[in-house]
Image (cartoon, helix red, strand yellow):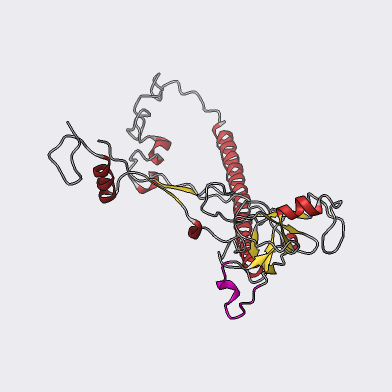
Amino acid sequence: MTRHQRNATAGAVYTYHERKKDTEQSGYGSDKARLGKDSVKDFDACNLTLQPCKEPVVTPEGVLYDKQAILEYILQQKTLIAKKMKAYENQKHEDKKELKELAEIEKKEKVAKFLKKETNIVSEPINPFRKEGADKPGTSKSNGQSELSNLYGDKKKELTSFWIPQLTPAASKSRFKKPSSKVYCPINNTSIKMKDLIPVKFTPIADRDTKTALISKKDRWMCAVTHDTLGNSVPSVVLRPTGDVVTADCVEKLIKPNEMRHPITNEILDEKRDIIPLQRGGTGFSQTNESLDVKKYRPSMHV
């Protein structure tokens, strides 16, 4: 049977267009999409505010932040850690107090048990007129109660009704783990400190347009050495001693062949410590440094 048109409903073939239309209307099925350039942040934007940095700083791992935003984050995390540590110390104090009380109760119980045994060691005179088996377990005593009864002796204190409040199970107390004293980076979860933040100096692009604000321009920064325009599609690095931002090609073609000397100050650079690759956003193209495929999971509809 041939396939029917989009709006035809008499055929037996469930076409791709009908399946897609029903999926959109019903809200079933997972959606896949690829983010474009407008959906990712610029390479010079703060990873917290997602806005161009007013006073950019970078971590040793190459994560860019606005100085004010990252300092507020670090102070907030330290305050939170202090609160968690205080709650943990109070928990330890309560545990010690509880253990001390349990030890005292156990000691009192041992003393009471010992005294009870000592008072029971009393020699009774033999009564020749007492019948055998009169006071054995299972027989009636003077009060008329049997030892086999569930209400005899100490069993009177035991509660057999599980539904009464005294026997209902109680939820265990929430326990606090000892918090770490370190503040972790919100992007790559590595330890971050104020003293490790490196100031970054972007070189404005040479442009005669002085009326347009810098934040409104599409191309804002350039390499401090080669004057190439910087962007998400251009790998960039930060030179730690001065904070200048240069392209990765500048490092490979100018700095490394020149005995790892800074192209501006002529000081010797350490390849592992002084050259920090700057993490950048995606460009929307397949040959970028980021994976931009996203998927939204929804209930599936089986046909």
Q: Nearer the viewer, residue 26 or 261?
A: 261
Counting from the top left corner in percent of width and height, residue 209 is at 61, 77
Q: Quadrant of the N terminus?
A: top left
Residue sitting at 38 percent across and 34 percent down? Answer: 152
State left or right for residue 2 relative to residue 268: left
Q: Nearer the viewer, residue 87 or 17?
A: 17
Judge whether 191 appears above or below 75 on screen: above
Count the numbered circles shown. Answer: 0
Q: Nearer the viewer, residue 176 or 185?
A: 185
Q: What secondary structure characterizes most of the magenta part?
A: loop
Judge whether 131 appears above or below 265 on screen: above
State left or right for residue 182 relative to residue 157: right
Counting from the top left corner in percent of width and height, residue 248 is at 71, 53
Counting from the top left corner in percent of width and height, residue 189 is at 62, 51
The extreme bottom residue here reads 211
Answer whether residue 213 is magenta in the image.
yes
Question: Which stretch did the figure color magenta?
Answer: 207-218
Q: Quadrant of the C terminus?
A: top left
